[in-house]
Image (cartoon, rainbow, N blue to C red):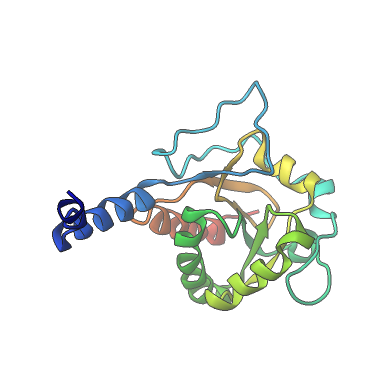
């Protein structure tokens, strides 16, 4: 009996188990932030519906723009520091699988668009003191070359608008208008949609 059980994990079974687990990780397009409780008036999008656009916020409120946030390296910063620039703001967390899949694509987009005046800011939804080491290690491992810090509770709740799913990305025009909001991540569809939204924001007239 013991010998029979020992042969259960054959190379073929191990292979298919790996394939199934990998597929589950890829197709889970969003995580529910453990730092955010969705309001009863808002239903979070299903996990198979990434890139949900159509923000309730039309622009970043003054209290979001002027909120001083802790940076992963260097001095504190505000989103108002990027006024007059096309801006991509990404809400994420180190423990979120789809966020980890999305980060290399954001790094590519930053390299592609930074010379055209696009700024990117990654705001972790985690508690700063508890996650300081893991966030800095994440930045190092993924070679993140855009600004990374922690969203204050006020900024986090305002931007999430009752939807606790991450990652979330906001494409903001030079005039401060939120052009597109993306919730979740799909390896096949999200990067080209983000690229298109950035092109539209660069082309937008005031």
Q: Is 176 placed above or below 71 here? A: above
Q: Is 176 placed above or below 33 here? A: below
Q: Residue 79 in the image: state x and y as whole percent.
A: 76, 59
Residue, x 63% and y 61% (percent of image)? 87
Front position in the image: 100 or 133: 133
Q: Residue 99 in the image: state x and y as whole percent.
A: 51, 57
177 to the left or right of 105? right
Q: Is 154 placed above or below 40 here? A: below
Front position in the image: 59 or 105: 105
Residue, x 16% and y 63% (percent of image)? 11
Front position in the image: 175 or 7: 7
Query: Farthest top residue?
Result: 41
- Quarter assignment of residue 56: top right
Residue, x 47% and y 56% (percent of image)? 194
Give the number of marks: 0
Residue, x 54% and y 37% (percent of image)? 54
Q: Residue 156 in the image: state x and y as whole percent.
A: 72, 46
66 to the left or right of 42? right
Q: Residue 32 in the image: state x and y as whole percent.
A: 56, 41
Front position in the image: 50 or 29: 29
């Amino acid at each position: 009996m013991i010998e029979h059980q020992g042969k259960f994990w054959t190379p073929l079974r191990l292979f298919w188990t790996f394939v199934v687990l990998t597929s589950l990780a890829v197709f889970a397009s969003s995580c529910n932030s453990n730092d955010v409780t969705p309001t009863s008036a808002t239903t979070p999008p299903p996990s198979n519906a990434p890139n949900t656009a159509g923000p309730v916020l039309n622009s970043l409120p003054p209290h979001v723009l002027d909120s001083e946030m802790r940076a992963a390296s260097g001095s504190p910063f505000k989103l108002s520091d990027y006024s007059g620039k096309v801006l991509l703001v990404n809400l994420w967390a180190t423990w979120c699988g789809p966020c980890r899949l999305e980060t290399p694509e954001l790094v590519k987009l930053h390299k592609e668009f930074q010379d055209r005046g696009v700024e990117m800011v990654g705001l972790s939804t985690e508690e700063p003191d508890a996650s300081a080491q893991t966030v800095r290690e994440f930045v190092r491992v993924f070679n993140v070359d855009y600004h990374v810090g922690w969203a204050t509770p006020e900024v986090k709740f305002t931007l999430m608008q009752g939807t606790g799913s991450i990652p979330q990305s906001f494409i903001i025009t030079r005039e401060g208008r939120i052009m597109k909001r993306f919730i979740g991540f799909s390896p096949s569809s999200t990067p080209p949609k983000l690229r298109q939204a950035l092109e539209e924001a660069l082309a937008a007239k005031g």
